[in-house]
Image (cartoon, coloured by chain):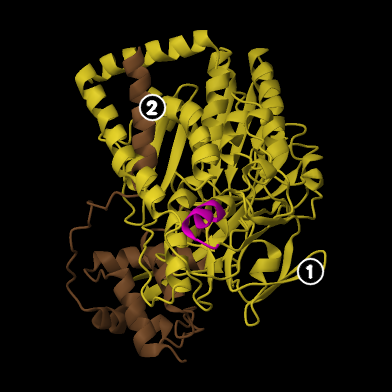
Chain colours: A yellow, B brown
Amino acid sequence: MDKKLFKENLEQIDAYLKQEGISRRDAMKMMGLGGAAMMMGSGIATEAKAASSNAKGKILIVGGGLSGVATAALLMRTLENPDITILEPNPKSVSYQSGQTLVGGGVWTNSDIEYMTADFMPDGVKWIQEKAVEFDPEKNTVKTDKGQTIPYDYMIVAAGLKLDFARLEGLGITESITSRGDSSAVKKIIGQNGLCSIYFGDGATDTWTQMQKFVADAKSGKKVKGIFTDPDTPIKCGGAPKKIMYLTDARLREAGARENAELTLYPNGGKLFGVPEYNDAMVKQFATRDMKYNYNHNLISVDPAAKIATFKKHWLEKGEWDDVLEEYEMVPASEKVEVPYDFMHITPPQMAPEEIASSPIGSDKGWVPVTQETLQHVKYPNVFAVGDVAALPMGKTGGSARKQYRVLVENLVAVMEGKKELPAKYDGYTVCPLITSLGTVMLAEFNWTGKPAPSFPLDPTQERWIWWLLKVYALKPMTQYGMLSGRA
Amino acid sequence: MKKSLSLLLGASLLFIMTGCDKKEETQESKMTYKLSTAEVYEQMCAKCHGKNAEGNTEKKGPALNDQTIQELRLGITDIKMGGSGGHSSGTEHEVMEHNMKKIIEKGMDYDTDAMAQYIHDNFNKK
């Protein structure tokens, strides 16, 4: 950030404080709180805990993304005699995925979020640049794509998820891809001719190109339609399908062309957000921006040449009288709906990696089944899962992983020490810094109670400039230098 | 100026630290339910999922006696919360979400974890 911009930001924080009626004194108090939290919190506590266990065992971590590397780093500092191996084929696996929205909206470029795994691999961890393809949890071994068989005493599955564009008809895509890996199978279609997706690295860059064309068309006086999808599977970052819509809205306004564009969200579900408080806030935000939505629409096919999207629209119909419920039974019904577009952002269907879903450590739905509080596998006590690949209710976000990896390490060490009780519990905390414009964010934090779980004494349903600063300036260094080293 | 910078820094630090160490003081006020879990199962669930959770194909109620406790917890929570972020729409699951609302309206609300435990303890066929 250059000095001028920095100064402007500070001035805006001052103005913000004034407007919010927060006195300098309170601000200092808040800062004091932050400082105190650091003094008393994990920073020092973790240092004290460092190398606090002499438990031994060969630990294999499948997947070296954010979750896998953060877990490895914390284990390295917790165990006196760590023996840790990470299997990760992608040399850029630790790139900052949360920034892909800002790349798609033209705030950042790919170089702002691309990081080399080698630079973040904790010292002492053995990194094998291969992919795990076969799992034998009865024998405690994993086989790699290059034919190596790797034995382990304890395994952590942190393999992330796959983007399944292949499920959408008409695109000619047959392979699933990851968010930061090779996307050649997809980018020849997605990222061209008005079609885009921020869910993969190149796709985010291409989204910005397509968005600029869309905005230019609107500015030239053409009446244009932008549509945004949200599928029927669990997804990474439930807010992203809407964040990119807010950013499109913001870019159109910036160009003075908003009135020429119609923006509509087509989510498979029947609400904008799972937590009622945040949902209500978003409904209002959509209304003030004239952003439209059509619920219960699941994208099933695309004609990229004609620029037509086909959705399965679904609803419940009254069936027979049900004596037990004393209500009419409900029967699902559906029809296909064709929607022409000039610009379409696709949030692809997502799934657990195929080789894990079909293995003994997977499940019917693919995701690795773990006890939701302890992150321990339901069948294999020496196996744990963390991050997107774990079968957990709600958020698949970096914010969730930031809470999970600490719980996992504490519990794994307990298992390694032969303890029966697992000491740490995850409460489902997740966070979605919902970008609502260029300069405002609603910091949606919540957990399994289904209620907001704010970290700050401020109304969590308000859009705020200070959260924009948190999102744009603080979260990336916190993730890349704090979390990847197991410190935050 | 400096203070503002400190504020942002302080705020980010607070954000980084909270939750790692903060004990949840937002404990849910203990809900009380009119009926016991067993009564709700018998009166509401049994018709479609079977008296012993063996399932009922005619009513499209899947068997529950072959699910792990964690599967039951996930499934029931998902149904009561109306889907994890709206991802279950357009399936039998959606029908069950609708039914769940009706069950609550009838005063037969229940604790999801207790229900999962009840089904697992009494009907799991292992």
Q: Chain of mark 2?
A: B
Residue occupying the point 27% across, 36% down: A36
Residue A73 within the segment the image draws in magenta: yes
Quarter of the image with the C terminus of chain A is: top left
Residues under numbered marks 2 and 1 in contact, where contact means CB atoms less than 8 Å apart: no
- In the image, residue A18 sits, relative to residue A106, either above or below, namely above
Q: Position of residue A190 (x, y in %)?
A: 74, 40
Q: Mark 2 highlights which residue? A: B9
Quarter of the image with the N terminus of chain A is: top right
Confirm whether residue A326 shows in the render.
Answer: no
Q: Position of residue A295 (x, y in %)?
A: 50, 46
Q: Secondary structure at mark 1?
A: loop
In this rendered view, identify the residue nearer to me: B5 or A246.
Answer: B5
A353 with respect to B72 (left or right):
right
In this rendered view, identify the residue nearer to me: B97 or B118.
Answer: B118
Q: Which residues are magenta?
A: A71-81
Distance of label 2 from label 1 (alpha carbons): 46 Å
Q: Secondary structure at mark 2?
A: helix
Q: Position of residue A231 (x, y in %)?
A: 58, 51
Magenta stretch prevailing secondary structure: helix
Q: Mark 1 highlights which residue? A: A148
In this rendered view, identify the residue nearer to me: B20 or A448.
Answer: B20
Residue occupying the point 43% across, 14% down: A9
The amino acid on which the numbered mark 1 sits, given as a three-letter code, is Gln
Residue occupying the point 40% across, 50% down: A46
Residue A192, label in figure: none
In this rendered view, identify the residue nearer to me: A129 or A219.
Answer: A129
Q: Position of residue A472 (x, y in %)?
A: 50, 27
- In the image, residue A329 sits, relative to residue A301, either above or below, namely below
The amino acid on which the numbered mark 2 sits, given as a three-letter code, is Leu
